[in-house]
Amino acid sequence: MNKRQSAVLDRKKLMADPIMVTTIVVLITFLTLFILYPLAMLLVDSFISDNGFSFDIFKRIFEMPSFTKAITNTLKVGFLVGIASALIGLLFAYVEVYVRMNKFVGGLFKVVSMLPVVSPPFVLSLSMIMLFGKAGIITRFLLGIYDNSVYGFWGIVIVQTLTFFPVCYMMLKGLLKNIDPSLEEAARDMGASRMKVFTSVTLPLMLPGIGNAFLVTFIESIADFANPMIIGGSYDTLATTIYLQITGAYDKSGAAAMAVVLLCITLAMFAVQKYYLEAKTAATLTGKASRGRMLIEDKSVKVPLTILCSLAAGFVILMYICVPIGSFFPTWGYKFFPLTGKWFKLVFTRYHGFKAFKDSFILSLISAPVTALLSMIISYLVVKRKFKAKGFIEAVSMLAMAVPGTVLGVGYIRGFSGGIFHTGFLQGIYGTGLILVIVFVVRSLPTGTRSGISALRQIDKSIEESAYDMGADSFKVFMTVTLPLIKDSFLSGLVTAFVRSITAISAIILLVTPQFLLITVQINEFAEKGSYSLACAFATILIIITYGAVLLMNVFIKHFGTSKQIKEDN
């Protein structure tokens, strides 16, 4: 009875707040229109043919040898990349948490963990071709090897592993830090060797976390478009096959069915990761460590592990450095010296570089604050409010995390090229900058929402309730009380959304029109043509922009953020 009365009271409070009701309605409309509707249209186009409801389109695409081969290729790459990334990430995390390192190695680890976040998704593919391709610096000019090829299965696997293992490293590092060291020390006191302690105590506690890291990487791998497109050669994956089905075969219904197949795979993996392994991981950890961990100083363990990780980290950094260096070579593959800046000049004089950077920068700059604000509003509603549609808003806002960019792009083509349900309504946004901004917002929304939810759960509800008691409405409370308290998360979400938008390619490559020139599309175009120096010049400027945005955010938070104010107050 008390619960029912409480629910009735919450509902009355909600209905008495028109700003809150309007916000919820607008949010539900936005999420339905730009996340659920495009995916629903994919299902409609896949199952509805001229004969009504049928599986004819699926039968047709599964009879295509190229599609069935693409599924096999995608799963092979995904599983191998997931396993390799999880193992390498575990090695790096274990060395950082359990082994006493010097500051240089620790600095290398921090750089490696940050690089994939602020770099375009295809930088390593360019580096791999330039270092190990047929005209590569190492293979051809240092080793004299002419008949090698980095294109295909192993090229994709290596590049994706180097791109995604830092994600596993960051995930597993947090889990290892939360394991109570007394559990392992008890085993050591009973005479167990370090290997025995690792295999019988640490590893069992980590298994759900390793599985979680594997699935996250698997999802990222099979959804990746840029790397297979550049370094895949004739080795097609589902993401590239969907793209070619639209741009090459002009088969929109077939592409929609292929997108549904890819979506089903990613959703299944996401469901396992979200609802099984995350809960399992939380149950296996013992909480905050009761005291500090005794770090390993035994040279027989420390030296080989540190050297191995340092070499791997150094190689990753070398791969990223190769791109800006490659942009100064006169003629790639034939002449490397003397260094020249002509490619940067050509970027801005012949290849419309100013327009590409202006369009990318403006669209990302528009989408970033919208994404950050929407993320904080959704987080606020999920954590601080009770209403029936709360679960719907949380689930749909997080759904975009499991939707590959290529799938979302096909969904927007099928959903908006003829207007909503082919009625012409909202057809005007198709082919405009607005639809690109919406895609940027949808793709970055889950990351900002997760960050906002974590921050809001740390705020005592009595702080906001006191503002309500003084007569403030929900908008006033959110803007003057809640948002200032989660300022750091808001700013972090702002720059993350900007970086993700300006480096995005998979979702927007199918939607961009000649009216807009985007940096990532230009890089992909020049890389496909073999103009690697030009692609490197574009990529170098893009990296500088993204690094600059991250550094500015860190400086701003350090001097004006919530943590700074709290420190000064104390």
Image: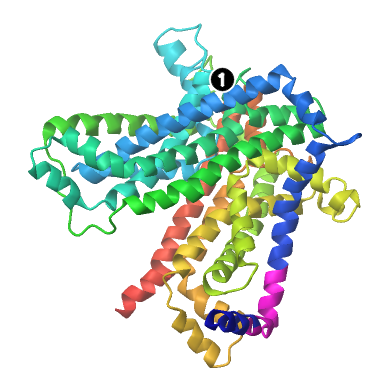
Q: Nearer the viewer, residue 280 or 179?
A: 280
x 66%, y 83%: residue:
17
The answer to whether 497 is drawn above or below residue 93 in the figure is below
Q: Quadrant of residue 100?
A: top left
Q: Residue furthest front?
A: 1
The answer to whether 330 is drawn above or below residue 87 in the figure is above
Where does residue 378 sit, x and y in percent of width and height?
59, 66
x 43%, y 7%: residue:
144
Q: Nearer the viewer, residue 482 or 44?
A: 44
Does the magenta run of residues contain 543?
no
x 51%, y 21%: residue:
155
**Disc 1: CA contacts within 10 A as few (<14), some (14-19) or many (>=20):** some
Can you identify the residue that label 1 sits on?
A: 331
Where does residue 281 sit, x and y in percent of width and height?
38, 49
- Name the image quarter holding the N terminus: bottom right
- Residue 351 showing in the rendered view: no
The answer to whether 7 is drawn above or below residue 319 in the figure is below
| Horizontal relation, residue 122 to residue 406: left or right | left
x 40%, y 41%: residue:
168
Magenta span:
12-25
Where does residue 309 sit, x and y in percent of width and height?
29, 33
Q: How many marks?
A: 1
Q: Nearer the viewer, residue 226 or 258?
A: 258
Disc 1 marks a residue whose amino acid type is Thr
Does the magenta run of residues contain 23?
yes
Secondary structure character of the magenta stretch overall: helix
- Name the image quarter holding the C terminus: bottom left
